[in-house]
Protein backbone atom coordinates (compact mmCIF):
# COMPACT_ATOMS: atom_id res chain seq x y z
CA UNK A 1 0.00 0.00 0.00
CA UNK A 2 2.66 2.49 -1.01
CA UNK A 3 0.32 4.62 -3.08
CA UNK A 4 -1.72 7.32 -1.41
CA UNK A 5 -5.34 6.32 -1.25
CA UNK A 6 -8.44 8.44 -1.25
CA UNK A 7 -10.20 5.94 1.01
CA UNK A 8 -11.33 7.30 4.37
CA UNK A 9 -12.47 5.13 7.26
CA UNK A 10 -15.49 6.25 9.25
CA UNK A 11 -17.01 4.76 12.37
CA UNK A 12 -20.63 5.39 13.29
CA UNK A 13 -21.82 4.55 16.83
CA UNK A 14 -24.15 1.53 16.70
CA UNK A 15 -26.48 3.00 19.28
CA UNK A 16 -27.00 6.18 17.21
CA UNK A 17 -27.09 4.91 13.63
CA UNK A 18 -29.21 2.32 11.87
CA UNK A 19 -27.01 0.06 9.77
CA UNK A 20 -29.71 -0.48 7.14
CA UNK A 21 -29.95 3.26 6.67
CA UNK A 22 -26.15 3.61 6.43
CA UNK A 23 -26.08 0.82 3.85
CA UNK A 24 -28.75 2.57 1.79
CA UNK A 25 -26.99 5.91 1.36
CA UNK A 26 -23.98 6.90 -0.76
CA UNK A 27 -20.41 7.31 0.43
CA UNK A 28 -20.77 11.07 0.05
CA UNK A 29 -23.89 11.06 2.26
CA UNK A 30 -22.10 8.91 4.85
CA UNK A 31 -19.19 11.33 4.81
CA UNK A 32 -21.49 14.31 5.27
CA UNK A 33 -23.29 12.59 8.15
CA UNK A 34 -19.99 11.72 9.84
CA UNK A 35 -18.63 15.25 9.48
CA UNK A 36 -21.81 16.71 10.98
CA UNK A 37 -21.73 14.41 14.02
CA UNK A 38 -19.09 14.78 16.71
CA UNK A 39 -19.64 11.19 17.89
CA UNK A 40 -18.24 9.52 14.78
CA UNK A 41 -14.58 8.92 14.08
CA UNK A 42 -12.87 9.61 10.79
CA UNK A 43 -9.47 8.42 9.60
CA UNK A 44 -8.26 10.28 6.54
CA UNK A 45 -6.25 7.35 5.20
CA UNK A 46 -5.91 3.59 5.57
CA UNK A 47 -2.42 3.70 7.08
CA UNK A 48 -3.63 5.82 10.00
CA UNK A 49 -6.60 3.47 10.56
CA UNK A 50 -4.30 0.45 10.39
CA UNK A 51 -2.02 1.89 13.07
CA UNK A 52 -4.90 2.67 15.43
CA UNK A 53 -6.55 -0.69 14.78
CA UNK A 54 -3.36 -2.66 15.44
CA UNK A 55 -2.86 -0.75 18.69
CA UNK A 56 -6.39 -1.64 19.85
CA UNK A 57 -7.46 1.99 19.71
CA UNK A 58 -10.51 1.45 17.47
CA UNK A 59 -13.79 0.37 19.04
CA UNK A 60 -15.03 -2.16 16.50
CA UNK A 61 -17.64 -3.58 18.87
CA UNK A 62 -19.74 -0.42 19.21
CA UNK A 63 -19.27 1.22 15.81
CA UNK A 64 -20.31 0.48 12.26
CA UNK A 65 -17.13 0.78 10.17
CA UNK A 66 -17.29 2.09 6.60
CA UNK A 67 -14.57 2.61 4.00
CA UNK A 68 -15.52 5.63 1.91
CA UNK A 69 -14.45 6.72 -1.57
CA UNK A 70 -15.77 10.22 -2.01
Image (spheres, rainbow, N blue to C red):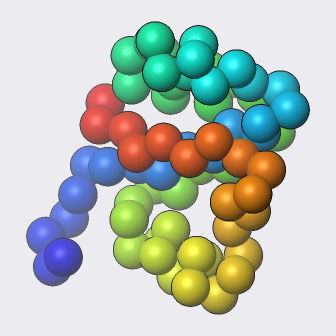
Residue positioned 75% across, 57% down in the render = 61
Q: Which quarter of the rendering shows the C terminus?
A: top left
Residue positioned 29% across, 37% down in the render = 69
Going by the image, does 23 lie left or right of 34? left
Residues 24 and 67: in front is: 24
Q: Position of residue 47 (x, y in %)?
A: 39, 74
What is the quadrant of residue 13 in the picture?
A: top right
Residues 56 and 28: in front is: 56
Q: Position of residue 30 (x, y in %)?
A: 51, 24
Q: Position of residue 68 (x, y in %)?
A: 38, 38
Going by the image, does 40 lie left or right of 65? right
Q: Is residue 32 visible?
A: no
Q: Is residue 41 visible?
A: yes
Going by the image, does 23 lie left or right of 61? left
What is the quadrant of residue 52 in the picture?
A: bottom right
Going by the image, does 21 lie left or right of 48? right
Up/down of 40 relative to 5, above or below: above
Q: Position of residue 10 (x, y in %)?
A: 55, 45
Up/down of 8 relative to 22, above or below: below
Up/down of 53 relative to 42, above or below: below
Amino acid sequence: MDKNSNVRVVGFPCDSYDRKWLDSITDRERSEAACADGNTFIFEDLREFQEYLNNDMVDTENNWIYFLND
